[in-house]
Image: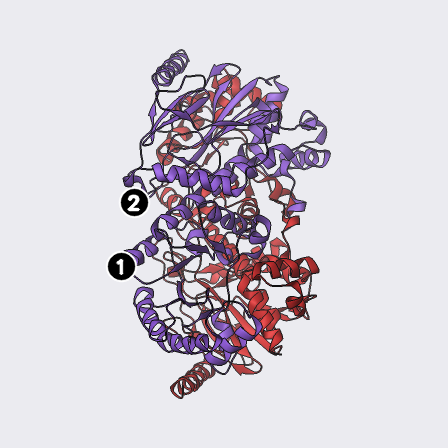
Chain colours: A purple, B red
Amino acid sequence: MSDATISDALTTDLYEATMALAYLREGMGGEATFSLFVRKLPPNRGFLVAAGLESALDYLARLRVGPADVDALAAAMGRPSADLAPLLGLRFRGEVRAVPEGRIVLAGEPLLEVTAPLPQAQLVETYLLNQVSHQTTIASKAARCVLAADGRPVVDFSLRRTHGVEAGMRTARLGALVGFAATSNVAAATAYGLTATGTMAHSYVETFPSEEAAFRAFARAHPGPVTFLVDTYDTEAGVAVAARVLRDLGHGPGCAVRLDSGDLGELAVRARRVLDAAGLSQVRVIASGSLDEYAVDALVRSGAPIDVYAVGTRVGVSADAPYLDSAYKLVQYDGRPVMKLSSAKVTAPAPKQVFRAPGFADVIALREEAPPPGGAPLLETVMRDGRRTGEPAPLSVARQRFLADLAELPGAARRITDPEPPRPTASEPLAQLTERVRARIAERLSRG
Amino acid sequence: MSDATISDALTTDLYEATMALAYLREGMGGEATFSLFVRKLPPNRGFLVAAGLESALDYLARLRVGPADVDALAAAMGRPSADLAPLLGLRFRGEVRAVPEGRIVLAGEPLLEVTAPLPQAQLVETYLLNQVSHQTTIASKAARCVLAADGRPVVDFSLRRTHGVEAGMRTARLGALVGFAATSNVAAATAYGLTATGTMAHSYVETFPSEEAAFRAFARAHPGPVTFLVDTYDTEAGVAVAARVLRDLGHGPGCAVRLDSGDLGELAVRARRVLDAAGLSQVRVIASGSLDEYAVDALVRSGAPIDVYAVGTRVGVSADAPYLDSAYKLVQYDGRPVMKLSSAKVTAPAPKQVFRAPGFADVIALREEAPPPGGAPLLETVMRDGRRTGEPAPLSVARQRFLADLAELPGAARRITDPEPPRPTASEPLAQLTERVRARIAERLSRG
């Protein structure tokens, strides 16, 4: 797939365009605010890491509905292109307030609020939900791996099983955002300035007459520090062979053996013993193979002598919680607060701010409210009139935001299993407004 | 993200390149065959639908390692570019045999076999695994929705929650491949010639003083058949309003109401009653909201009067099984069959063919074996010397393949819960070769 052939204006659910057209036809170009938030955290999530904002802003800055887009949208609606003339030339000219990437957020807290003429604010829904939901899902999963590893390096091996190449690029970037040490993904390492990692597969070992021949050939081709994969045939024997070759090589710092199958904790103990007996105490043990935060946590708690954890598939697809219950809800139109009443999906009206006081005492408030004592706002204005208010922050800045928030996060929210997320409260003015709007809608409905 | 900036040659795990370099340096350019297969089906999968081949072949045809790629790979390895000179200009010049998209496959059956000079065959591993794993995952999930809907149309609403835009494009295409009737994704509808679908969101209804005003404005803007979303406030009242407006409009064929929350089965009964009482028996009921094959199956079995099922998030991420246990294993190098012995991950050696006899009596055989009685081969040669052997098949052809295979699939494999997949058997020559290679490796290992 080449993105070059995918128009931003068409990367949308059809209904965004049918609604935008109806709004334009009815003269409903008034200012609307939509709020993007996660209704409920998935099981085993004590927090989320805000992500996806940078690619969302790139899209908003780029978006324009050109003549070919109008033709395609008209074809999708089964109508003549002339009927869609009001959409031609549409761009995003609105304001975006958002929680910067890397900050920790909770259920119900707006990650992003868009304020723009209604047709514009509507048309961008699908893309914004896609990017923010996916990237927040992955960043949150990766963050849990960092927590589980408890200071040991974590590296990203996910590219082969992410949902496409784009998802692989995102996963590598978001891993780095939450503190991963390296990625196997060369394109991502190149694009984002990350450390790349990786040496050999089982198939490599199999093409040689013996493991020793395979290791020696590798070292000839790669004079620097090497990592030998030791579990192609028999792991303990493989470690012994690796130790012999590493000793002959002078086993410079940075060398390692990798375990990719079997009982990783038990095999790491044996590998460590063989390496130490050979005087190779500086050679590290890397573990990989079906790892995620649960497995890493169990290994770390068991005291396994594993120095580096490589996570892949299960993190790249966030296997235990591959999506978020995210929503992009209209909260204000033309100066009037709006909310949805149906079923259990009630949403609070009006543009909002989240104030965080120490210990994650978060208050969801109306946008214009003054901060409560000790509370600092999470949402910042990142786009005005369709233009970014500043340069995109480097990844290192986002990482610092994450680490700073993580340091404040209560222990119960950091647990790998059965965490208890902090519960944000609604400010008094927000609670009162919610009640007033609910009553107003109920009255209108009862009048029929 | 713009794919234009992502080089195919860098869309790889670093170790593919370090191995390729070692092979080139050692003069190991002999012909290798790698086999891509799924070791084990995920829980609640009775079959898989082969997918991802077309984008995999596009990649293989495009791939070339240019000077900028060599620089980036060298930087990733921390080495001077000159050391990587052997990689410069590398292209894929090999052969690919594969199961065509849309065919039903089982655990252990090669989806694809690559035969090429070893460095080339190795370098493409990551990309091929990524595309085939992701797309086979999604096609298989979508196929189960088609089964559950039992003849009723299924449509794709997944774009807002797929893992990026690329994944959304794939999901729409793969839905169509297994028989979905339409997609909300305009870019995909445009790119793949699919029917687009979608009308309005809750936010649309909320911006008007009443549901009736919202529906009438929509009909003014969209003179053709309309679908009204009826659950923004109170579903039964919403259906009554929709019925009134539809009657005034003359309710042409193709009109519908959509239910997106609450007890969809119960609400559909009430909606149907209101519509029928208003003489609108031709107006259809569309259901959406957290649907997947399990929910669709339950609704269909309950007799819910739902005419169209819209599936989204859970299908677009294959929520209950978001990845496959796929592998790309070396099975032959330089004329010598190869296999991996470690732990439970034993793989069978040598290039293979799968022969399917009626009733899914599949036999995994050596490539050169004659078919068993009634058996027809699944793998076809789709690329030679790095060039496709024919034009990509239209999606309609892949859909026919799927429907033909589905019609043959045993009932136990079609079940939505606790299906029993057919079990392929190994041919006698393959079983004998596996034993010989195992013994040969064991002997070599015992000699040290």
Left-right relation of A425 to B232: left
For the residue pair B134 and B259, the one nearer the viewer reads as: B134
- Does residue A244 appear in this view? yes
Task: Give me the C-alpha separation between circle 1 and circle 2.
Answer: 16 Å
Q: Position of residue B253 (x, y in %)?
A: 56, 32
Q: Position of residue A315 (x, y in %)?
A: 42, 52
Can you say which quadrant of the picture contains the N terminus of chain B?
top right
Q: Position of residue B321 (x, y in %)?
A: 41, 53
Q: Position of residue B109 (x, y in %)?
A: 48, 69
Which of the numbered marks, if any, corresponds to residue A415?
2
For the residue pair B251 and A92, the one nearer the viewer reads as: A92
Q: Which residue is rendered at x = 62% and y = 16% of the image?
A: A27
Give the residue at mark 1.
Answer: A302
For the residue pair A443 and A316, the one nearer the viewer reads as: A316
Amino acid type, callout 2: Arg
Chain containing the residue with disc 2: A
